Image (cartoon, helix red, strand yellow):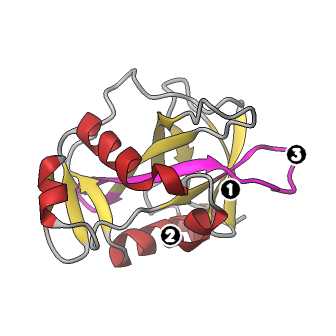
């Protein structure tokens, strides 16, 4: 569970993937949620790290000591879909990850839910990054999402973006393929 690997994986994912981002945080201060446990494991694929929420509800993934000059990754969550009709509800969260590259700061958006069948005593949450490159322009425009290049889309309205994610992906939330393939 190497923090550098987690940071490198997330940074690589943002750089190579068709991501949703914003130049400003869209989850208002005080409106983030903490996951239902004091400590959790956050995973991107099989690269996992145990983290705790800070007093402000932000999860900090620090760089390893040998990479002290790297910036930590800050992740905040907001409920996206509680799948309320299910006895075995596994809520889906919108995750906002603050990325800093020198003086440049951006906020990238992922989905997270508890990994089913995880073999740890600490709850394990996995991330996926829905792709924006396959969305039609008319759909993006309807939700105030702007394509900035062939791989990136700028989000400006949090509620519209959440509605987009639910309308576009809610049927996939219960499938393991969605969580494994994105």
Q: Which one is in front, 81 or 115? A: 81
Residue 44, picture quadrant: bottom right
Left/right placement of residue 140 relative to residue 16 reads: left
Mark linked to residue 6: none
Residue position marked by numbered label 2 in the rendering: 182
Observer-side mark, 1 or 3, equals: 3
Residue position marked by numbered label 3 in the rendering: 121
Quarter of the image with the N terminus in it: bottom right
- Mark earlier in primary sequence (2, 1): 1
Mark linked to residue 49: 1
Q: Is residue 120 above or below residue 53?
A: below
Q: Residue 172 placed where, x, y %?
A: 53, 57
Query: Quick check: marks 3 and 2 in contact, CB under 8 Å?
Result: no
Tell me how far mark 3 sits from mark 2, CA to CA: 25 Å
Q: Which one is in front, 168 or 154? A: 168
Residue 118 inside the magenta-drawn segment: yes
- Mark earlier in primary sequence (1, 3): 1
Q: Residue at x 76, y 53 (%)?
A: 116
Q: Residues within 10 Å of mark 1 (few under 14, many from 20)?
A: some
Q: Which residues are magenta?
A: 100-125
Q: Residue 170 placed where, x, y %?
A: 47, 49
Q: Is residue 68 above or below residue 94?
A: below
- Mark earlier in primary sequence (3, 2): 3
Q: Residue at x 62, y 31 (%)?
A: 85
Q: Residue at x 37, y 74 (%)?
A: 17
């Amino acid at each position: 569970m190497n923090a550098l690997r987690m940071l490198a994986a997330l940074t690589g994912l943002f750089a190579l993937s068709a991501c949703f981002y914003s130049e400003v945080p869209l989850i208002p201060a005080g409106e983030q949620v903490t996951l239902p446990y004091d400590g959790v494991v956050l995973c991107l694929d099989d690269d996992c790290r145990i983290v705790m929420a800070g007093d402000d509800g932000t999860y900090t993934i620090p760089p390893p000591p040998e990479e002290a000059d790297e910036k930590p990754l800050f992740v905040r969550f907001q409920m996206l879909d509680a799948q309320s009709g299910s006895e075995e509800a596994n809520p889906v969260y919108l995750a906002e990850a603050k990325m800093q590259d020198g003086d440049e700061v951006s906020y990238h958006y992922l989905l997270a839910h508890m990994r089913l069948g995880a073999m740890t005593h600490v709850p394990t949450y996995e991330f996926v990054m829905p792709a924006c490159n396959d969305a039609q322009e008319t759909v993006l425009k309807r939700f105030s999402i702007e394509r900035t290049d062939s791989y990136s889309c700028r989000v400006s309205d949090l509620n519209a973006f959440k509605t987009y994610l639910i309308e576009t992906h809610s049927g996939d939330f219960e499938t393991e393929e969605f969580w494994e393939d994105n």
